[in-house]
Image (cartoon, helix red, strand yellow):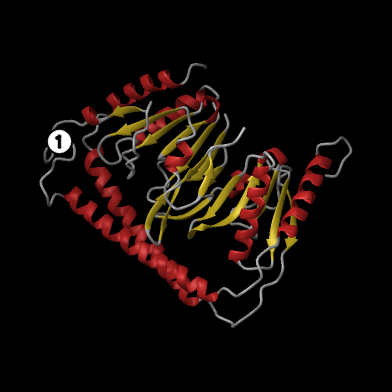
Amino acid sequence: MEVPIRQNRVGLKMQVRNKHVFASSLTSRGFFSYWDEILQDLKYVYLLKGSSPAGKSLFLRLLGLALADRGYQVEYFHKPEDHMTLEGVVVRSLGAAVLDGLPFGLNRGGSGLAPKVMEISLPERTSLQERDGEAARQARLQVAELLREAGEAWARVCAHYRKRLDEEAVKIRAANWAQEIFPKSSQLKHFFVDTIAPEGPVDFISFLSAACRKRYLIKGAPGTGSLVIQEILNHALSRHYRAEVYHSYLNPGDPVMLIFPEISTAVIDGTGGYHPSPLPGDTTWDLTGCLRPGGEGGGRSETPGTEAEQAEVELSFLLAAAAQAVRKAQQEQQEEEQIEAPPSGEAVAAFISRLLREASCSQTPGGFH
């Protein structure tokens, strides 16, 4: 049976059964990584050596496509600083990950569950000139500072509405909505679902959730849906459902989407800076009625110049500036990279043969460990 192909907003063809996410992100609170959690259940981690980031990304893309053609479900992990570049693929049915070098957050020792780490050598790149990378580093520092300021602006926007939020009313609604989702009385995985790119914020929300049979969209004033997301997650974990928790660079502490694979259901916080387009069969949960009367009018119908609207204007400016800084960092990085031959199909096929052979041996009693 052919797997449906969808085109996402950043031009990547995505098989619905596969997953495109970020394992780490440069956020408003600094650098966050979930790599240690993502890799903890795997048997093998292969680290690519040699080549450039672009060359290793191409190898990973070819590897993922070849494994998907063989019927394996593949998780693609994109670099937060360049969302069109891959930094790893994970195939859980084989218990294996292939990564562009050693990612931040991978604990190589101190645990009996730590994966076996092996290195794979790719053809060395041909050096054109030596550069110290200082310009790219400074551009990334500028991105970090702009995101910190953007996070503060977003926090002011959310605080304006949360101080008027009737939390008890929200919890009651969330409990009722949880009953609607979960029929029975956990595994938890964290990912990042978005990043700031040269063209502005990009995310995989629509295409991760489009594969779900049911989607719930939370509607309301900025930031008011985070309490519902947390309540829904608590109910799910108390009933031992597997949960995928998706975070945003803007406020990594508050998840913006939950996916429950066992029941093919997604809950999306439309108050977290996203405005997902409704699909047929979606259910909207409206929190507008949970705002207490007061302030400068209700909902979003405030007069221009209020603190919340000023913060929103500042947020838009800061995100645009951050996107420009990302563009500069990306240009500097591309200038520093060197020319090389692309990975051959034979190299990818040879590695797949090795991967399948070692995975098969590890599943055989007395086999390779």
> Residue 167 location, x and y as percent?
29, 29
> Residue 266 location, x and y as percent?
44, 32
Horizontal arrangement in the rendering, residue 306 relative to residue 158 (left or right): left
Q: Nearer the viewer, residue 237 or 191?
A: 191
Q: Is residue 249 visible?
A: no
Farthest bottom residue in view: 129
**Which residue is pictured at 53% across the width and 53% down the height?**
78
The residue pinned by badge 1 equals 298
> Residue 312 location, x and y as percent?
23, 51
Q: Which of 26 and 95 is in front in this view?
A: 95
Q: Can residue 247 be seen in this view?
A: yes
> Residue 75 location, x and y as percent?
59, 44
Q: What residue type is labelled 1?
A: Gly
**Which residue is pictured at 51% across the width and 24% down the height?**
238
Q: In this view, does 59 lie above or below 229?
A: below
Horizontal arrangement in the rendering, residue 127 relative to residue 359 (left or right): left
In which quadrant of the rendered image does the C terminus lie? Answer: top right
- Kindly indicate the quadrant of the structure image that contains residue 368: top right
Q: Nearer the viewer, residue 303 or 111?
A: 303
